[in-house]
């Protein structure tokens, strides 16, 4: 073969290789976007745009500002998106729409303090239809910042608090791959942390999120940068950090009770099914000190308890666990997660991130259940101690993580909180006034001057927290959505999901 022919063949081989690589990357990127929900049909939000109404809700029972009781026979006047007045006396004014609540119950709109919207804008309608008028996105993107602006401008949906992407430091190649597939930021230069943080603030992010695999020097860099830039620092306790080093830091919000459980597990030396009871005794023993430090350092803790309670069930029988939720409302891209090699999400049995491997030894399954049930119980020990001493607990769900259905899962979380020892009023405050105060926003309370984000219920949630699901109407920034329209919203999302579905969920309905 002549040199010229060899070079020509080599050139074409290189071209073919580059084309193959390009096609593979294009396909993978397409699949990545699909399993974060980007390919699912989007419901036109304009179908549900309602005007702000000057209205008076009469004959309504109103949740008191302290959240402890219902005040009967009140009139609540709403004007230009704000609560204008609350009281027993009201003079009818021309132009006000009068709405007789017939003795129903008015509470603040709910706040989910830990969600993942990913690339699923239909979730905004799911939250609204479930009375969730504010969500806190815990792995934000510029797309989420755009949705935040659109909601402020009138798009139907909850107001958004948007934290940055999760920050790990994982090395160049792994960091690049995780940024692409798992939507994580890779911190790679300690000296650039402050400037990177400033960039995120200028883009409009509300907080910096740190994650599990961040080493001490990067943690300290974020710890120094956040207050200088004027940003909240929240997230996970990195496995590189002992609890004693976290207390007194600028990490003022833990993304899960789980962060404390994992830190205590590291202190314990790692428990297993044989040492589970000893570990729980250790958690009980350490709980007073943990709570004392949380209070001393003014730290908030997001609950995500219902998710942790689901782990044992997902591992024991994933099909049964999926039967327990309505998959029809979950973005099909997210539940199908069609790239098994990139195991960052997935709900269905073949791709579920919590399932046990098919070859998991049957003899070990009982021990696995002991382990995960103890894991959930450790959370309840800490939650009970925190609730008893007044730690700021924020109700959050980790929505879109299996099996947390956006919007619906917050009601399940409130039930889990009461079953773990919170009273009804405490649970309700954890999803209303507590996160509102934490964000320093005039929401989360039914009082004059506050944003008119409200939930009208057929029954009293202070008697039974499950009554938060008996929704008669939602008022979102002064816009009234009655029950029938909320049902239309839900049906529209279900239909869009069904049109986009690649795998049947008939076996789980």
Image (cartoon, rainbow, N blue to C red):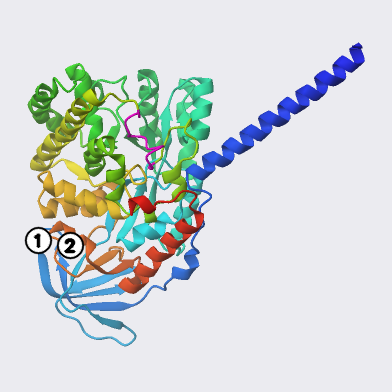
Name the residue carrying label 2: 467
Mark 2 falls on what kind of element? Answer: helix
Distance CA(mark 2)–CA(mark 1): 8 Å
Going by the image, does 145 lie left or right of 376? Answer: right
Tell me the quadrant of the picture where the N terminus can be found.
top right
Crowd around label 1: few <14 · some 14–19 · many ≥20 (10 Å): few
In the displayed structure, 347 sits above or below 444; it is above
Can see residue 61?
yes
Counting from the top left corner in percent of width and height, residue 179 is at 50, 32
Counting from the top left corner in percent of width and height, residue 457 is at 21, 68
Counting from the top left corner in percent of width and height, residue 121 is at 46, 54
Going by the image, does 54 lie left or right of 364? Answer: right
Going by the image, does 11 lie left or right of 220? Answer: right
Q: Quadrant of residue 265?
A: top left
Please say if the residues under marks 2 and 1 sit with CB atoms less than 8 Å apart.
Answer: yes
User: Which label sits on residue 463?
Assistant: 1
Tell me the quadrant of the picture where the C terminus can be found.
bottom left
Q: Quadrant of residue 488?
A: bottom left
In this view, the residue in front, 227 or 282, is 282
Crowd around label 2: few <14 · some 14–19 · many ≥20 (10 Å): some
Q: Quadrant of residue 220?
A: top left
Q: Give the magenta-colored segment's residue range.
A: 347-358
Residue at screen point 18% across, 35% down: 376
Counting from the top left corner in percent of width and height, residue 361 is at 28, 23
User: Which label sits on residue 19?
Assistant: none
Check if residue 9 falls in the magenta segment: no
In this view, the residue in front, 388 or 338, is 338
Magenta region's main secondary structure?
loop
């Amino acid at each position: 073969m002549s040199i010229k022919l060899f070079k020509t063949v080599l050139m074409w081989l290189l071209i073919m290789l580059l084309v193959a690589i390009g096609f593979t990357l294009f396909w993978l990127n397409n699949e990545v976007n699909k399993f974060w929900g980007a390919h699912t049909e989007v419901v036109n939000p304009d179908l549900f745009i309602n005007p702000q109404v000057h209205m008076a809700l009469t004959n309504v029972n109103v949740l008191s500002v302290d959240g402890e009781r219902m005040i009967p026979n009140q009139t609540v006047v709403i004007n230009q998106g704000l609560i204008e007045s609350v009281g027993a006396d009201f003079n009818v004014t021309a132009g006000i729409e009068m709405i007789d609540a017939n003795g129903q119950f008015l509470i603040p709109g709910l706040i989910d303090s830990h969600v993942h919207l990913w690339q699923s804008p239909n979730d905004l309608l799911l939250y609204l239809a479930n009375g969730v008028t504010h969500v806190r996105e815990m792995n934000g993107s510029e797309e989420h910042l755009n949705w935040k602006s659109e909601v402020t401008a009138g798009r139907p949906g909850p107001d958004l608090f948007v934290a940055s992407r999760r920050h790990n430091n994982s090395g160049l190649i792994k960091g690049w791959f995780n940024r692409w597939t798992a939507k994580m930021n890779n911190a790679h230069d300690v000296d650039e942390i402050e400037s990177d943080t400033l960039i995120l603030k200028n883009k409009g992010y509300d907080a910096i999120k740190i994650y599990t695999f961040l080493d001490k020097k990067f943690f300290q860099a974020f710890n120094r940068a956040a207050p200088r830039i004027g940003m909240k620092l929240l997230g996970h306790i990195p496995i590189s950090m002992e609890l004693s080093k976290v207390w007194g830091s600028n990490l003022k919000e833990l993304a899960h009770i789980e962060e404390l459980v994992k830190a205590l597990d590291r202190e314990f030396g790692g428990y297993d099914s044989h040492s589970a009871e000893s570990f729980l005794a250790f958690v009980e023993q350490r709980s007073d000190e943990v709570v004392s430090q949380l209070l001393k350092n003014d730290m908030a803790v997001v609950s995500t308890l219902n998710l942790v309670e689901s782990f044992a069930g997902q591992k024991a029988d994933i099909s049964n666990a999926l039967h327990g939720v309505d998959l029809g409302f979950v973005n099909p891209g997210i539940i199908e997660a069609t790239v098994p090699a990139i195991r960052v999400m997935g709900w269905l049995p073949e791709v579920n991130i919590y399932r046990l491997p098919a070859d998991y030894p049957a003899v070990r399954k009982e021990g696995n259940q002991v382990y995960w049930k103890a894991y959930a119980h450790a959370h309840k020990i800490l939650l009970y101690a925190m609730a008893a001493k007044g730690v700021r607990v924020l109700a959050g769900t980790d929505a879109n993580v299996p099996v947390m259905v956006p919007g619906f899962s917050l009601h399940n979380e409130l039930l889990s909180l009461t079953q773990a020892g919170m009273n009804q009023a405490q649970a309700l405050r954890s999803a209303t006034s507590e996160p509102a105060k934490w964000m320093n926003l005039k929401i989360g309370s039914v009082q004059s001057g506050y944003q008119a984000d409200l939930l009208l219920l057929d029954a009293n949630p202070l008697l039974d927290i499950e009554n938060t699901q008996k929704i008669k109407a939602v008022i979102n920034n002064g816009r009234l959505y009655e029950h029938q329209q909320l049902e239309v919203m839900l049906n529209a999302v279900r239909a869009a999901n069904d049109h986009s579905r690649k795998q049947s969920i008939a076996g789980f309905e």
